[in-house]
């Protein structure tokens, strides 16, 4: 039997009125929160030449990206799977500022596959990024903005997880591994595959092997940082990473947080601090709602290497983790061509009220809006609003 023409692909879904309204309200709130911190809105295109879209991003993003052929040029195009490389291109080539640039964005991205249950292959990605400042102040600002955005959306019970890519870089540095093997080790750490990690570490120098196998156990509260100092081989890079995390933790004292020094989930372009914010999601279990970190190399492929740090989230996931707002109060009005009626409706809408006209024959229907008032004509033929 042929498939119905209106059946959507797996993990692609329509967004219906109540949820769409909620998502749009969240989007506006997040953009306002970013603007309150001084972030300027940019709108990169959904489709780009593939070589520009994926240059320097790593295999993981390549596998997530849909490809197609441009009928005008014959070149291969990609549907963006992540907006950060595009924003880095905008910073490097279009804005080309010498100082700090704070940029935000919100738009759809498309993925070839999902990485967790209930995820969409068409996330609505919101993000904010700082370019041009290498200090911890920018890391802290991005963390605070991410938390402020989620708080403004109504997220409760947030948990912050912190890590730093430079820890694994410091552990592996004495072994001078090739890119392929390093990527395989990163992949094993990301999913905490102990057997794969043991096999990959088997012929490494003894101290590197022991430190690598210790990383998955360096998980827990802030005490993990001191355990790492005592257990891992000391190096300037390791201590820089641990000192950075300690500084950030000290400025987030009121926030429930954990440290996972083996956490390498996400895109390959991260170069320093990484974080994720969790809260109870639609499954009743902790769900990752935002992810970010430092990625100082992301603009290098565009000819302008700039310090960069930022975060992103999926509004379609966020909407499932917060309580829907109450329906907006509205005014029900009769439909008609009477000039005074039409003038009264126009005046109410100009004042910001929602006015729903009941079309002939549909006066008793219930719709998305909570009509708690009605527009009626009084004895003097004037139109007035009365409570229901």
Image (cartoon, rainbow, N blue to C red):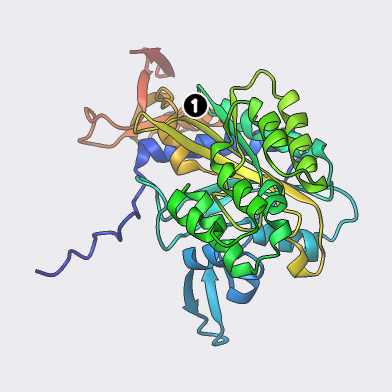
Q: State the SS at label 1.
A: loop
The reply, left or right, for residue 328 in relation to residue 126 is left
Residue 47 shows in this picture: yes
Above or below, comparing residue 47 to residue 264 in the picture = below
Quarter of the figure with residue 261:
top right
Q: Pick whichever, 347 or 245, lies toward us.
A: 245
Going 67% across and 56% down the picture, which residue do you hit? 172
Image coordinates of residue 59 in percent, x first then y, are 55, 67
Residue farthest to the left, as pictured: 1
Q: In which image quadrant can residue 376 be found? A: top left
Residue at the outermost front position: 206
Question: Which quadrant of the rendered structure holds the N terminus?
Answer: bottom left
Residue picked out by circle 1: 353
Residue at left offset 49%, top offset 54%: 198
Q: Nearer the viewer, residue 52 or 216?
A: 216
Q: Is residue 145 left or right of residue 22?
A: right
Q: How many marks?
A: 1
Report x, y in % for residue 23: 47, 39
Q: Is 240 on the left or on the right of 190, as rendered?
A: right
């Amino acid at each position: 039997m042929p498939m119905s023409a209106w059946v959507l692909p797996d993990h692609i879904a329509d967004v219906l009125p109540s949820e769409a309204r909620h998502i749009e309200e969240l989007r506006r709130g997040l953009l306002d929160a970013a603007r309150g911190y001084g972030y300027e809105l940019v709108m990169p295109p959904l489709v780009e030449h593939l070589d520009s879209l994926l240059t320097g991003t790593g295999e993981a993003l390549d596998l997530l990206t849909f490809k197609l052929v441009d009928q005008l040029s014959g070149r291969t195009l990609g549907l963006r799977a992540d907006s950060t490389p595009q924003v880095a291109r905008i910073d490097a080539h279009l804005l080309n500022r010498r100082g700090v640039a704070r940029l935000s964005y919100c738009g759809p991205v498309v993925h070839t596959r999902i990485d967790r249950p209930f995820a969409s292959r068409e996330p609505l990605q919101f993000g904010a990024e700082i370019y041009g400042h290498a200090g911890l102040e920018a890391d802290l600002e991005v963390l605070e903005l991410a938390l402020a955005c989620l708080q403004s959306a109504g997220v409760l019970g947030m948990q912050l997880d912190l890590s730093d890519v430079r820890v694994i870089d410091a552990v592996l540095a004495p072994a001078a591994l090739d890119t392929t093997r390093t990527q395989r080790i990163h992949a094993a750490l990301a999913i905490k595959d102990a057997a794969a990690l043991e096999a990959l570490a088997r012929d490494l120098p003894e101290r590197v092997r022991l430190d690598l196998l210790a990383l998955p156990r360096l998980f827990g509260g802030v005490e993990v940082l001191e355990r790492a100092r005592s257990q891992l081989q000391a190096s300037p890079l390791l201590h820089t990473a641990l000192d950075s995390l300690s500084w950030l933790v000290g400025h987030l004292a009121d926030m429930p947080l954990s440290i996972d020094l083996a956490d390498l989930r996400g895109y390959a372009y991260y170069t320093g601090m990484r974080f994720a914010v969790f809260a109870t999601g639609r499954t009743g279990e902790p769900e990752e709602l935002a992810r970010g970190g430092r990625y100082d190399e992301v603009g290098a492929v565009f000819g302008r290497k700039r310090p960069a740090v930022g975060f992103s989230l999926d509004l379609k996931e966020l909407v499932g983790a917060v309580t829907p707002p109450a329906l907006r109060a509205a005014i029900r009005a009769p439909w008609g061509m009477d000039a005074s009626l039409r003038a009264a409706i126009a005046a109410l809408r100009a004042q910001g009220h929602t006015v729903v006209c009941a079309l002939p024959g549909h006066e008793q229907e219930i719709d998305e809006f909570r009509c708690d008032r009605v527009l009626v004509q009084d004895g003097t033929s004037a139109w007035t609003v009365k409570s229901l």
